[in-house]
Image (cartoon, rainbow, N blue to C red):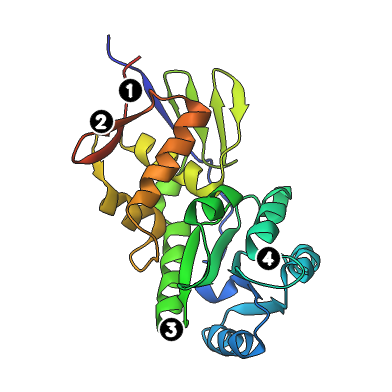
Amino acid sequence: MSSRILFYPKPPRPVQPTVAPNAYKILVVDDDPDIVELLEYNLRKEGYEVASAPDGRKALEVAPQFGPDIILLDVMMPHLDGIAACRQLRELPRFKDTYIIFLTARAEEFSEVAAFEAGADDFIAKPIKPRALLSRLAAFVRRDKDPQTQISSIEINGLKIDRTGFAVYQDGRKITLPKKEFELLAFLAASPHKVFGRDELLQNIWGNDVFVLARTVDVHVRKVREKVGDHHIQTIKGVGYKFNTDN
């Protein structure tokens, strides 16, 4: 018997002016004043609203007041490092979906897995190239407004994905997923039976110009399976992954 898949459109919103990319707020967190100055200059030149903090501890004070849409977060900082700060930010409801990009030197002792588990969405390697950063931010804004997000929820075999509330329910039980894990699950579920390669998933979930490896996809798939069950995402050996609608 074929599975029943339900897609629910979002209710119409009041007509409002289109939100321009320069309306997005960005919090820069780095203990190097030269890097902060460079980023602030380039971001403001593009019209972004920018605030800064010199370390993770101060970022936890500034973020609730500023309300950033995007946080650029250095990894190695005094008082509170980036991974610890990211973890604490994700514990605050208003920042559970905020886009967090880590700034990291390639020579640093750094674990991608630990960073993703703390809630990181992306990485940028130092020295930072402003044009590459601005390109990536523009890609995030485009994805943030993608028409696919107009599907508010998907229900397949007892799994409900609420895209409006960034929530997942398995047989009525709420499951909390970090932003990238949620986006990966929702992306696969929106095209059931279609097989996506790792590079295609990286492009659609993380963007084109991203300092992450193909194994990043495998890490996120593993974490999603641990939380929602092994059977929803199927591995197609030598190709990639697809959403499985079979019981």
- CA gap, disc 2 to disc 3? 39 Å
Which of the two discs, 2 and 4, labels the residue nearer the N terminus? Answer: 4
Residue highlighted by disc 1: 245
Indicate which label's residue lies in the foreground, 2 or 4.
Answer: 4
Which of the two discs, 3 and 1, labels the residue nearer the N terminus? Answer: 3
Q: Is residue 42 above or below residue 176?
A: below
Crowding around mark 1 (Cα neighbors within 10 Å: few <14, some 14 to 19, many 20+) is: some
Q: Nearer the viewer, residue 84 or 20?
A: 84
Q: Amino acid at mark 2?
A: His
Q: Position of residue 165 (x, y in %)?
A: 60, 41
Residue 116 in sight from this viewpoint: yes
Dot 2 lies on which element?
A: loop
Q: Position of residue 110 (x, y in %)?
A: 52, 62
Residue at 63% x, 59% y is 83
Residue at 49% x, 51% y is 113
Tell me, for residue 81, which label it has, or none. Answer: 4
Q: Quadrant of the C terminus?
A: top left
Q: Nearer the viewer, residue 160 or 127?
A: 127
Whether pointer 1 and pointer 2 mark residues with C-beta atoms closer than 8 Å, the reply is yes
- CA gap, disc 1 to disc 2? 7 Å
Q: Amino acid at mark 3?
A: Lys
Indicate which label's residue lies in the foreground, 3 or 1.
Answer: 3
Q: Quadrant of the N terminus?
A: top left
Whether pointer 2 and pointer 4 mark residues with C-beta atoms closer than 8 Å, the reply is no
Residue at 71% x, 64% y is 67
- CA gap, disc 2 to disc 4? 41 Å
Crowding around mark 3 (Cα neighbors within 10 Å: few <14, some 14 to 19, many 20+) is: few
Q: Is residue 245 above or below residue 141?
A: above
